[in-house]
Amino acid sequence: MNGTKIRQFFLLLIDAVLLVISLNIALTLRYFAPPSAELWQKHLTLFVPIFVVWLLIFYINSLYDFRKFINQSRIIEQVTKSILIAFLVTIIFFYLMPNKELNPKTNLIIFSAIFYILFLLWRLGFSLLNKKYLPTMNVAIIGYNEIIRKTIQTIKRNQQLGYKIKFILSEKNNVLIDVVDHYEIDLVEDVNQLARAIKLHKINVLILEKDISEMKELQKTLFNLLPTGINYCNLTKFYEEISGQIPIEILNKGWFLENLNLANKKNFERIKRLYDLALSILILILSLPFWPFIMLAIKIDSRGPIIFKQIRTGRNGINFKFYKFRTMKVENNNFSITTKNDARITRLGKFMRQTRIDEIPQLINVLKGDMSFVGPRPERPELIKDLSKSIPYYNIRNLVKPGITGWDQISGEYHSPSVEDTYKKLQYDLFYIKNRSVYLDISIILKTIRTALGREGL
C-alpha cells in the first residue's frame, strides 16, 4: 500500500469514527443525557447503513482524492455539497422506508449539523497538517526524457502527493537546463557524485529512467547504497502511480509480456461477468418505465431513428452491433468522428450525453456479452484500422471487453477519436487493463455516477 492509499484509508477511518461520535453527541443533546444502551443500539442499527451511504457519497464527490484538495475554499465547497446531498438522500430514505419503532428526523437534523461542523474542521485541519507536517519523500531521478518531464510537472502540480524532487543525474542539454531552472531542481552531471548527492539531499526514492540491468556503470554505486534504505523505482511504475497512466513512449514488448498476463485474470473475469449481468438487469428494470418518455422526447426533438446502431469492435477484434439513444441530427450528418461541442448534437442529445442517459441501451450489449460495464470504449472498425497504423500497441486495448464507462472517461479530460487524443486515451486504457480488479471497477462506476450527476459528460 503506497503513501497515498494509506492516507486515504486513514481519512476514511476517521470519517467513520466521526459519524459515530456525531450520532452520540446528537442523542446526548436531544435527550439531555448520554443515550441508554437500548436507545443507542436502536439508533446505531438504523444509522449504520446510512453511514455507509454517506461514505460512498463522499467517495463519489472526490473527498478522498488528494489531487482535488489544494485550497481551503475547494474543501469547504466539496464538504458542504457532499453533506447536503447525503442529508437529502437520507431524508428520502426515511420517507420511503419508514421505521415503525424509530423515525428520528429531528435526530437526523441535529446529527447532520454536528457532523458537518466536526467533519469540516477535521478536513481543514488535515489539509493543513498534510501540507506542513506530514513527511515528504525526497526524490532523485537518474536520466532524462519526455516522461521524466511529465513526471516533474505532475509532482509539482500535486504537492499533496508527498513527493519533492531534489536533483536529476543526467548529461547537460538545453532542454534539461530549462527544466531544472524552471522547477528549481539541482543537476548532477558526474556519476561519481551520485552517492554524495543522495546522502546530502536525504533521498528516499530514486527513479530510474532505464531498467537497472541496462545501467552497468551505476550498478555498483546503487548496490553500495542499499544499506541507506533508499527505494529504487522504475520510471514507468512511478509515473503510473502518480498519474494513472501507462507511458507508451518507453514501453517495449517485454513490458506487455510481464504485465498483461490474461491467465491471472480468469477468476476476476468470471466475477466481473456476474456483476455485469446483475447490474444491467437491475438498471434495465429500473429504467424501463422511463423509456417511453425518453423515446418520445427524442422523436419530438429531431427527426430520425430513436436508437442509434453502429458496428463497433469488441474483445479480440470481434465486431458487434452497438446500441445507444440517438443524440445527433440525421440531416447533413456524415457520421465523422465526434468532436467537443459538436454542432450535430441536439439540445436533448447534449443533456443525455452529459447525464449518460444515451448509453442506457448499451445494457443490451452487456447482457449479450459484447460489452462490460467497465472497459475501454469500443471504436468503429475503420477507425481502429487507421489508428493502429499511427499508434504503437493500439490493438492491445482489444484484449478485454469494451465498456460503457472506463478509466479514461473519469479522468476529467475529453478525448476524441483523433490520433493525438487516442494516444492519450490509450495510456489510461493500458492502466486499466494492467490493474483491472473488482475494486477498480467499483471505483470507476462510482465516479461515473458523480460525472453523470454533475453533468460532466460530452
Image (cartoon, rainbow, N blue to C red):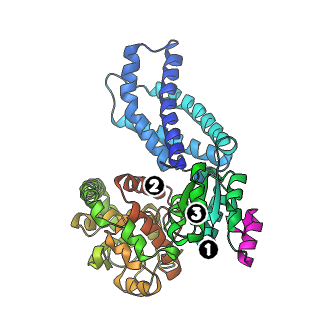
**Amino acid bearing label 1:** Asn
Picture layout, residue 351 above or below residue 88: below
Given the image, on which type of amino acid does mark 3 rest? Lys
- Dot 3 surroundings within 10 Å: few (below 14), some, or many (20 or more)? few
Tag 1 or tag 3, which sits nearer the N-term? 1
Q: Which badge, 2 or 1, is on the more N-terminal residue?
A: 1
- Please state the horizontal and vertical placement of residue 376, each as a whole percent of the image: 39, 69
Please state the horizontal and vertical placement of residue 147, each as a whole percent of the image. Answer: 58, 70
Q: Residue at x 47, y 75 (%)?
A: 345
Kindly identify which residue carries mark 3: 220
Above or below, 430 against 449 in this view is below
Q: Is residue 133 left or right of residue 19?
A: right
Earlier sequence position, callout 3 versus callout 2: 3
CA gap, disc 3 to disc 1? 24 Å
Which residue is disc 2 drawn over? 447
Residue under the image location 51 percent in, 25 percent down = 21
Instruction: Please report the residue visible at 64 percent of the width from the left and 72 percent of the height from the top.
Output: 144
Please tell me whether residue 293 belongs to the stretch shown in magenta: no
Frontmost of labels 3 and 1 is: 3
Residue 260 at least partly seen? yes
Magenta span: 173-190
Q: CA distance from mark 3 to mark 2?
A: 46 Å
**Nearer the observer, disc 2 or disc 1?**
1
Q: Which residue is mark 1?
A: 145
